Image (spheres, rainbow, N blue to C red):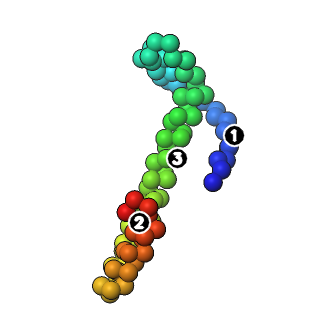
Amino acid sequence: MSNTTIPLTLSLTPEQLDAVTAAVAAANAAAVAGSPPTTAHAYLTGIVTAKINALVQAAYQASVAALGTAAAGLDYEHRKALIATVKAAIPSA
């Protein structure tokens, strides 16, 4: 699966820009000596990526819950077969 790049332009109020600038400055002050400085772009990219990852996790959890709910209506033998099929599809299971 390949990554998709989505260009994003933000319009920030002066207050929002000051908050981002302060957060970037704080991140740079707390950074390990010798590490490259964080930019506003990198900082905001990290925030957006973290939010997207949270959305991915929530969608995954919802899918697993829906599968569990749907499987609960199956009889025992079908539930066992479903579990075996899922476990067989997961290398570490």
CA distance separating discs 2 and 3: 18 Å
Name the residue that disc number 2 marks.
Answer: 64
Tag shown at residue 21: none
At x 44% / y 55%, what residue is drawn? 58
Mark 1 or mark 2: whose residue is earlier in sequence:
1
Q: Secondary structure at mark 2?
A: helix
CA distance separating discs 1 and 2: 31 Å
Q: Residues within 10 Å of mark 3 (few under 14, many from 20)?
A: few
Is the residue under label 3 in contact with that under label 1 (CB below 8 Å)?
no
Report the amino acid beneath label 2: Val
Name the residue that disc number 3 marks.
Answer: 52
Q: In front here: 33 or 92? A: 92
Mark 2 or mark 3: whose residue is earlier in sequence:
3
Q: Position of residue 62 (x, y in %)?
A: 42, 63
- Which quadrant would the N terminus be assigned to in this image? bottom right
Q: Is residue 84 above or below residue 77?
A: above
Q: Residues within 10 Å of mark 2 (few under 14, many from 20)?
A: few
Q: Position of residue 61 (x, y in %)?
A: 41, 60
Can residue 70 be seen from the camera position used here? no
At x 45% / y 18%, what residue is drawn? 31
At x 44% / y 16%, what residue is drawn? 32
- Mark 1 vs mark 2: in front: 2
Name the side, left or right, on which 93 lies relative to 36.
left
Q: Residue 29 is drawn in which quadrant?
A: top left
Q: Position of residue 50 (x, y in %)?
A: 49, 41
Q: Residue furthest left?
A: 76
- Mark 2 vs mark 3: in front: 2
Q: Secondary structure at mark 3?
A: helix
- Which quadrant would the C terminus be assigned to in this image? bottom left
Q: Residue 70 is drawn in which quadrant?
A: bottom left
CA distance separating discs 1 and 3: 15 Å
Name the residue that disc number 1 marks.
Answer: 7
